[in-house]
Image (tube, rainbow, N blue to C red):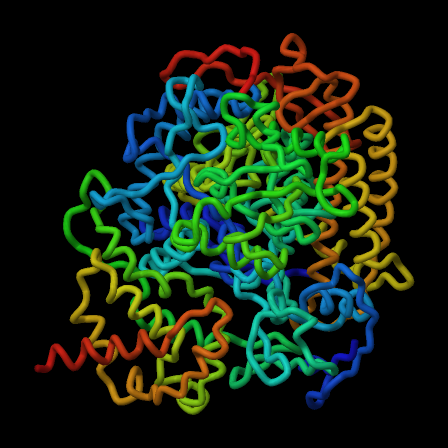
Amino acid sequence: MALPVRKFDAVIVGAGGAGMRASLQLAEAGFRVAVLSKVFPTRSHTVAAQGGIGAALGNMGEDSWHWHMFDTVKGSDWLGDQDTIEFLCREAPKAVIELEHFGMPFDRNKDGTVYQRPFGGHMQNFGAGPAVQRSCCAADRTGHAMLHTLYQRNIRANTHFFVEWMALDLIRDASGQVVGVTALEMETGEVYILHARSVLFATGGAGRVYASSTNAFINTGDGLGIAARAGIPLEDMEFWQFHPTGVAGAGVLITEGVRGEGGYLLNKDGERFMERYAPNAKDLASRDVVSRAMATEIKEGRGCGDDADYLQLKLDHLGVELIESKLPGIREIAKKFANVDPVSDPIPVVPTCHYMMGGIPTNYRGEVVAPKNGDPDVVVPGFFAAGECACASVHGANRLGTNSLTDLLVFGKASGDTTIRFLKENPHHKDLPKDAADLTLARLSRLDAQTNGEKVHEVGAEMRRTMQAHCGVFRFPDLLEEGVKKIGEVAQRVQRIAIDDKSRVFNTARVEALELENLIEVAVASLTSADARKESRGAHDRSDFPDRGDENWIKHTLWYKDGSRLDYKPVHMTPLSAQTIPPKVRTY
Amino acid sequence: MNFKIYRFDTDKDAQPYMQDYDIELQPTDRMLLDALERIKALDDSLSLRRSCREGVCGSDAMNINGKNGLACITKLADLKSPVELRPLPGLPVIRDLVVDMSQFFKQYHSVTPYLVNDEPVPERERLQSPQDRDQLDGLYECILCACCSTACPSFWWNPDKFVGPAGLLQAYRFLADSRDEATSERLDNLEDPYRLFRCHSIMNCVDVCPKGLNPTKAIGKIRDMLVRRTV
């Protein structure tokens, strides 16, 4: 069966912060670009970011991108690539100022400049401290304000959005060049080939592999599943960030900005326990450190409540005025999801899966890279990625708060610019291979024909439980090994999932089944990579190897779907222009 | 808990119908969306939009016991059983609780919803005083869920000519921005018997807004600006 073909210069998959920053470059340069999104652009998960965008503007006091770079390298526990980190931190101020010019409603200082708040792991003087105010924000709705601003700017640029379209598979020709994607129009159930000279993935995260997550339902790692099926490796998938403050029971995010504005954590004895774990930065240590401290408090019986299974985030001392002006969204969330008003009572919180440090390997220009003929970083022609789905790798083993939005802006723009250069150098479409649609058609027809198969929600729940129990804040060798086996079994079950709903029109059962096929690749990659990394670094903490193993493990993991095979590649220790920041003991 | 849910699959149903569901809730099911996810696990053919599940993305707006709201921040404990769920009123239904929002977004797009400032771009940020920035509070937080516009009788009658509360709230968001230079073009764009003046201050928009915003007040401010520039 042949699919209808539509032709574009460029296809972008995903309309969150990264996708829309990239599309802006392409649309303003006059290219025919199609931006696919499973949801209306302003519903993308960037909308849920709260605390701010990290950039050394220096509006609140002295700051420099060199300090920001040091903090990010240290935050990454020396797994981040120092060339991409330099690029991130150096470009960040420009990216924020540009966003302000687009109309972003940043909070302001008395002198009219953008207000910046402190955030975890961001310090003065190359980590010496004290905390620096670097997070540019719009109250505690920074992601919402940024996503709407980018969408608005794209309206101005006449960007062509394909709303409620889901990308299904990547099309590569015999040379490996990426020449398009297959995609499903959800409203009609029609499937198309989108033939393009370049494809950029900005599909976001995959936090829905865990049972307890701050992530939206749509965060199903579609770009990673698609890339993995097309033979692209996934990088550093063992590194998952657990955000210290998800609302206990609900998983909804409470921004680190609460602690930035002066809030702090308490255990059941009313002790400000972070003083013991991070005497210097205290509650503003980096997220892996705070989450581990919290998990330790709970494990050792100092959690709050009847089951001693959560901790308290205290902010009533900040006063109602500050809470209403800087943290109004948090007050709303706490009232709705925790039944407390933080003006008078602490919020019950637990570490909750929040962010995927790993992803599709890219360089600082946003080109997707994979090993070939002994070179670990060979560009895959025609393929670009940015944002959470990409691993540039700026976040390494642990991301600093605020650096995700910075990542979207800086690498969204860079990948857009690199795409433009590629399009100029490659003015003609490459032919579609004869088998362009085969994989997609086979997957869809299996799903339509399958009867008496496994239920999508049951298999999905088993996957999420497995990840939660075997790949959490603390990791144990026996649990990891068992987890790899279990997730392999779940992956077998995914091949037999069935749906009752066979309608063509807005069939969300089909979409959820296709999403699960992507999530499972992420889960298998994560557990396999975690089991193999025999050290503790950043968010990966093993009971049998409690220390960082710099001698053997300053290297990136690469997972291939084919045979669930692992490979490794060196970390880029040489920045673009700055001095290398050599590994040292990481304390806060 | 009992639910009566509007069902309509244009692929197979001749006409819409209400379907009953009786489900057992778990103690962790706090919000209406939790119950809907439970129903969907039993009947995967029920179609609805949802994403963030915390009231910021605006996907799961629907008509809940006769009033528009977001399923993800509507507490089950506050709902009378049986809970009657229908798609947002006044928009074409694609399937079940999923409506075609084209008309709604068309009106949003019609108000030039982006900052206009053709001055040479400065090297640093454009300065804005905290007081000027405060003018945007209560405006920029809109999540485009369409609860307000689809609760507005004026929008039901003239969805093609009346901008509606959501679009007008955003129109005012840019009129109120000290950095924007297109005030007179923006007012010209709204000075019309329908686009702005079909608002009869019924205030359904204020009543249903899940973010607690006040489009009627913003519309009043635009009217003031129009009056002021004629005198």
Q: Is residue A373 above or below residue A248?
A: above
**Residue A186 can be seen, yes or no:** no
Give coordinates of residue A161: x percent, y percent. 46, 60
Q: Position of residue A90 (x, y in %)?
A: 35, 28
- Residue found at the very far top of the displayed protein: A551
x 67%, y 49%: residue: A248
Q: Relative to residue B71, is residue B200 depicted above or below?
A: below
Considering the image in quadrants, where does the N terminus of chain A appear?
bottom right
Residue sitting at 66 percent across and 40 percent down?
A351
Q: Nearer the viewer, residue A60 or B155?
A: A60
Q: Residue at x 27, y 64 (%)?
A: B174
Outermost residue, right side: A452
Question: Is any atom of residue A499 visible in this view?
Answer: yes
The outermost residue toward the front is A269
Instruction: Give residue A87's quadrant in the image.
Output: top left
Residue at the location (46% across, 35% down)?
A: A119
Residue A164, image x and y in percent? 56, 63
Indicate the position of residue A166 as horizontal and vertical percent values: 60, 57
Quarter of the figure with residue A154: bottom left
Q: Is residue A172 left or right of residue A63?
A: right
> What count of labels does the image hold?
0
Describe residue A100's horizontal placement relative to residue A521 as left or right.
left
